Structures are given as structure tokens and as C-alpha cells.
Image (tube, helix red, strand yellow):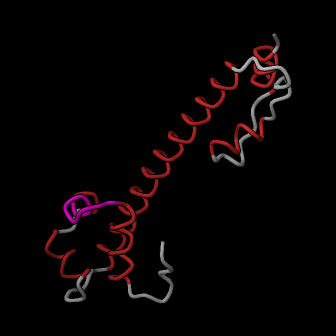
Amino acid sequence: MRDASGLPLNKVLKILRDRFDLTLVDLGRASEINISTLSLFENGKGKLSKEARARLQVALIQALRKIEEVERERAEQKRRDALGAAKALKVEGMEELSSNLVNYAVGISNKALSKEEMEELKSAAKP
């Protein structure tokens, strides 16, 4: 995402809508702001009241939270898939499959496997 610091709010709004894949209709519903008002504002031809800006902020935060949840669910599914694949491996020398390796393979750097998951991996890898 490009750096939005120093840009006017209407330009930042367009960047966020694009990033969050939000239509004016979606954002209008979520913020309870008329679509025409949002369009005029985004194009630099209108203004938003303080109250409308607050509702817009809340709507954008909610959109971000939804995106984060979807991304978290995808990452967790990748992690489960990698764990399942690792359990299926019964190749000699794979007994010490590192949780960091599994997590690195699926792009999760902050979540290590639990001790129970590591034990399952070790026992599944034994011939």
C-alpha cells in the first residue's frame, strides 16, 4: 500500500477503499453516509461533517477488522494444512521437524506449534 501520510483525507479514503475492496455503496451503508456525499467528498468537491467523519472512521475500522479476520483465517488454514502434511511424512530424518519450519512455510512467523502438536509430528514421523 502506498504511503498516505500528508495526503488529504479524500485521497486517503480512495486508497483505503481500493485496498479494502469497498464500493461507495458498501461504505455508505456501513457509515450511514449518503453515497452521493461520499462520492463528492472523495472527488474533492464536498465536505463531511465532524459526525460523518466519525462514522466514516468507524466504518473503515470495521472493514479493516473484517480483512484482518479473513487473513487470519487463511493463515490458520495454511498452518493446519502444513501440519497435516508434516504428520503424513514418515520419511526417516524428519522426526525433528521444527515448528519454525512449518510456520515459515506458511508465512506465520509469530505462532509456534504447541508441544502437543510437535509430539504428534514426531510420533507421526517415526517409522
Residue toward you, 106 or 71: 106
Which residues lie in the magenta part? 21-28
Q: Is residue 105 magenta?
A: no
Residue 93 lies left or right of residue 73; in this view the side is: right
Residue toward you, 22 or 27: 22
Residue 96 lies left or right of residue 24; in this view the side is: right
Tell me where residue 89 appears, x and y as whole percent: 71, 21
Name the residue at 71% across, 42% down: 111
For the C terminus, the image quarter is top right
Q: Quadrant of residue 81?
A: top right
Q: Residue furthest front?
A: 92
- Look at the picture and state if 1 lies above or below 124: below
Q: Quadrant of residue 46?
A: bottom left
- Look at the picture and state if 95 lies above or below 77: above
Q: Is residue 26 magenta?
A: yes
Name the residue at 48% across, 89% down: 6
